[in-house]
Image (cartoon, grey):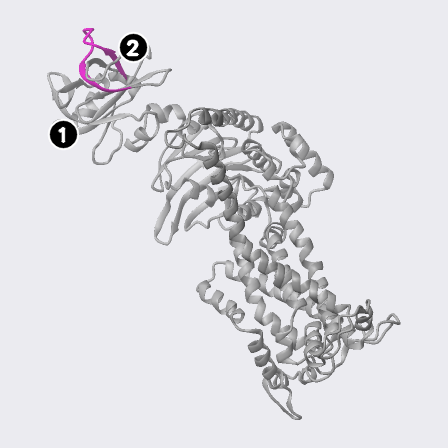
Amino acid sequence: MAQVIYDHVTKRFDGVIAVNDLTLEVKDGEFLVLVGPSGCGKTTALRCLAGLEEVTSGDIIIGDRVVTHIPPKDRDIAMVFQNYALYPHMTVYENMAFGLKLRKMPKQEIDRRVKEVAEMLGIQDLLNRKPRQLSGGQRQRVALGRAIVREPQVFLMDEPLSNLDAKLRVQTRGELIKLQRRLGVTTIYVTHDQVEAMTMGHRIAVMNQGVLQQLDTPENLYDHPANLFVATFIGSPAMNIFPARVVAGDGTVRLVAGDVTLEAPAEQRGRLAEYANREVLVGIRPEDLIVQPGQVSEDRQLRLPVEIVEPLGSETLVHLRGPAGALIAKADPHLHFSPGELASVRVKIEHMHAFDPQTELALF
Amino acid sequence: MTGKVIEEARPRPGVATRPMAARSRYRLVERLIPILMITPSIIAIAVFVYGFIGWTTVVSVSRWQGIVPDLSFAGFRNYAALLTSYRFQSDIRNTIVFTVFFLIGSLSIGLLLAVLLDSKVRGESFFRTVYLFPMALSFVVTGTVWQWLFTPGAPGQPTGLNLLFEQIGLPVFQTWSTVSHVWPGGGWKPEWLRVPFGVPLAMIPVIIAAIWQMSGFTMAMYLAGLRAIPDELREAARVDGASEWQVFRWITFPLLQPVTLSAVIVLGHISLKIFDLIMTQTGGGPGFATDVPGIFMYETTFKSNKYAEGAAVAIVMLLMVSVLIVPYLIWRLRTETER
């Protein structure tokens, strides 16, 4: 068990910068999720830590050891690959024992550890099978077992659940969380799935185009995104974003977008005053738009036409014609909306976000 | 089943007048066409392969010597004569020696070249073509060229490779291709065996020529095999704690096993039937030091007109190749049905 530090790590492939000046500290025993769209450099960052890619500049520290130029075999890490990478010519037992055998561990100790881990994962009956005789879920467990049995300082996981079907993925996700909490091994987990990121990580590092965007707890990431990218990447459906003009006067600050006018939250007036008569990007999460069909109540600020209705069962997504493109709102599934009709909308102003249009950094 | 019933219960207009007859005729034709398509090749193979194997077997147990066929049954006399003859015993020994060294040489050099090329060498396709090129040549050309290279030259005036050996201080190799010495030779041997155990020194240049020609092909096979192994497996092994050598020893090499098997089959059947290379390079000499069953069969049959004896050699060669190929075919069939 150990902490992991990326110290200004840059990785360049033939002129393309895959990871750009990444500085990141993972605490001992922490479950850190690296998340981002494909090509954002998250897998490259993980492979640099594993030693499968040589970093262009910067240092990587595991525990209290600088491992930047140490080959993978001496880094004391274990990795679970997306396609599991089980050795097809070896049985499950041999797959799990391989790393221990290379370390010249006594046979009885190998046997004890393999059986113990196999039992923990419920694969003790599969030990004599070859990988091709296993189902996807079973292979995934073996890959996990091969990592656990090594008792490494750090677990690296590269989208280990992405090849499982939806139901199994949810189940395994839960088991993986429990397992990590129980073993307490520092884990770095790469995924492009934000649900996995939100549910599994103690902290989440969001990456885009090789650059770390934000490193925070799931709650903070969701409630206080640092910039426009994080705001729109985390959350499904994505946060609604539209440009609005800041109009100050009469002791209030209003945000005007087309014929929609929103009063800015009181505590943010000072921050917004700097942008008086300029545009900012307003962000509102779908659940912060309270919609009701028809023109009913008095405290609704807006009346917007309904464009599309997507009933999901647990909730209904209502696409409204907003000031600039569609606004998506999450509505009670028992309410009935019809395309073309007007809906009344109340904005939870206190949960509103605003971003600088140039820097795309969050104002609040 | 039910679908079929419904279909027949509701005949389409037009077909309705004679549905059963038309359908069964159509089915018959559909079944007949594939059979008709493969019939010519089946007949050709039956006659020209299996028919001729049968004919050769018949000849091999006959008394046919000379121009006029004599198919009277002679029992296994021809085989007995073969097995006790000095030349045929030499041939078998030479074939074993040639096959073993040719296989070991081609496989190890081919694997080495493939591993080197697979390590992301610059200009890989150029080297691949260079290594593969000897395979484009006929064994006759290879034999002739290597004969020139190994020609000892006049005493005191070495030529070709021997000149090279002399200049680097190894004149001992000059006699390779001219003596019929068998190394180590001597020692104990069963009474029925008339030839000494060991490696005929003159065989070495032939083996070198054959390896030169076929190791590029083996390399191509191994290279394809290496490319088929996902990088992830090697990476997983590295993370598991394997050094590069251990990755090769425990992951890459075992996964190349099917390639090795195919290469052994391809190279093995070439070496067991080798004729043209040796015929042009050494003609089987000196003495019978590089003679092989292929040359023996050719000379017995078409130079000495001993058809029955030649046919017996052919059958023995067929059996040798079968020992190699049949288990392979059975294994292939079994793994194919498994899939």
Dominant secondary structure (helix, strand or loop) of the stretch shown in magenta: strand
Residue B253 visible in the picture: no
First to last magenta residue range:
A289-309
Distance from label 1 to label 2 (Cα)? 38 Å
Residue, disc 1: A278
Mark with earlier residue (1, 2)? 1
Q: Secondary structure at mark 2?
A: loop
The chain holding disc 2 is A
Looking at the picture, how far across and down is residue A47, in whole percent?
47, 44
Label ID, residue A335: 2
Rendering quarter of residue A313: top left
Vertically, is A89 above or below B249? Answer: above
Q: Residue at x 69, y 53 (%)?
A: B327
The chain holding disc 1 is A
Vertically, is B260 above or below B193? Answer: above
**Do the dots labelled 1 and 2 sit on one chain?**
yes
Q: Amino acid at mark 2?
A: Leu
Rendering quarter of residue A122: top right
Looking at the picture, how far across and down is residue B309, in whole percent?
75, 73
Vertically, is B173 above or below A310? Answer: below
The quadrant of the picture occupied by the C terminus of chain A is top left
Closest to the observer, A29 or A66: A29
Closest to the observer, B321 or B9: B9
Q: Secondary structure at mark 1?
A: loop
The local crowd at label 2, few if under 14, some if 14 to 19, many if 20 or more residues have their Cα within 10 Å, is: few
Q: Residue furthest right?
A: B191
Residue A298 colored in magenta in the image: yes
Q: Nearer the viewer, mark 1 or mark 2?
A: 2
The local crowd at label 1, few if under 14, some if 14 to 19, many if 20 or more residues have their Cα within 10 Å, is: some
Vertically, is A89 above or below B5? Answer: below
